[in-house]
Image (cartoon, rainbow, N blue to C red):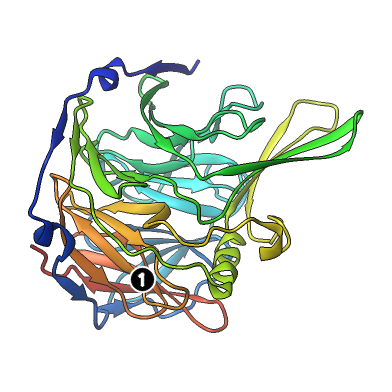
Amino acid sequence: MTTIATRPALAAAVVLVTLAAPGAAQDPPVVTLETPAATYADGLGSLRGVRELPGGRVLVADGLGQALIVWTPGGGADTLTNVGEGPEEYETPDGLHPLPDGATLLVDIGNARLTELDAELDFVDTRPIAQGQIAPGMSLLLPVGTDDRGRIYFQQRPPMTEPQDSAWIARFDPATEEIERLGRVRLQDQQRSESGSANDRSVRIRPMPLTPEDAWNVGSGGRIAVARTGEYRLEWVEPDGTVVRGPVVAYDPVRVTGADREAYMEELSSGLAVLVTSDGGPPQLSFSRGGRGAGGGPDGFTWPDVKPAFGGGAVRVDGEGRAWVRRHVAAGEPQRYDVFDILGRRIAQVRLPEDRRLVAFGDGHLYVERRDELGFAWLERYEMPALP
């Protein structure tokens, strides 16, 4: 039985405010990635997860292609062929996250479960993504990250029956089956609509695109990096609940244009959809990606005039314990990332080549996705640049 606890330490957490000179805080050195050190030879239908394994091999999840690929940079690649619904099979591979002793946590949305692969990539154990009864308010173990103890960090949302302004950062411990709530993050603005008759009413809650929201991720040691919106800054939540707060980072808001709206809708079309159905029996849970069932086009949404500094899912933590925050830029511009140190100070900005996005870190490496004009994804590996 899964139990949920709320950490009381956060209510009385010690907040350390680190000040920096305005110039140092606002004008960091800029590093531009140039040429990849290695490129996977084949285009992928959808690059959903990348995990560098001990020894340098790379595990790649192609959700659309239903393939788990083991790539040796500079060499060849193999595919794990056990596709299916059995206990040692996968259906639709999605996220990949490190576990202790070289193991990997696979998010299999096709089978609505999490699967543990050991260091030899043998299937060890599975558990359902849904924790508890399938109903509004259930906990969905959709990992944002994991730590070096194998605990799973995820965003626990309230029941979507009314608009909500925040969600919990939560941690699931497989050893105890307990869920611990570690703090709250701001959600995008939401709008509520109703349709149908009194006896057949449909209520729809959906986010308002490009409105401010917090973003977060976790490092291997369990330190949580939270990018706060409004006053853009980086906070670290320590394992003991202490909060280390960096200085405010100034930014110039980017205006929202028609191209930005189209780019947002394109990104939304590959978002994760959660569906609960019932044919008179117990409810069934399923997940999928793809399709434009989110409003039919840009005209179905209310849009802000400008973008916030960053969007949801913008934070990653590298192997050195630095937080990388993907900034909002104008549609078509190369992606850029603010890099923050362990005190929440912005120390550098990294710019990617055109049509690239950061997907994972390895041991001294960056893994980047390039999309071509046909929609195929190409995986590139870069050497980690020298940072302050």
Which residue lies at the image location 10% right of the left edge and 45% below the top edge? 19
Would residue 276 be visible to someone looking at this image?
yes
- Asked whether 120 or 257 is in front, the reply is 257
Would residue 53 be visible to someone looking at this image?
no
- Asked whether 15 or 222 is in front, the reply is 15
Image quadrant assignment for residue 274: top right
Q: Position of residue 139 (x, y in %)?
A: 53, 29
Which residue lies at the image location 62% right of the left edge and 62% below the top edge? 269
- Asked whether 136 or 79 is in front, the reply is 136
- Disc 1 secondary structure class: loop
- Asked whether 173 or 265 is in front, the reply is 265
* Up-down relation of residue 283 to residue 12 (above or below): below
Crowd class of label 1 (few under 14; some 14 to 19; many from 20; radius 10 Å): many
* Up-down relation of residue 169 to residue 305 (above or below): above
In the image, 253: left or right of 292? left
Disc 1 target residue: 335
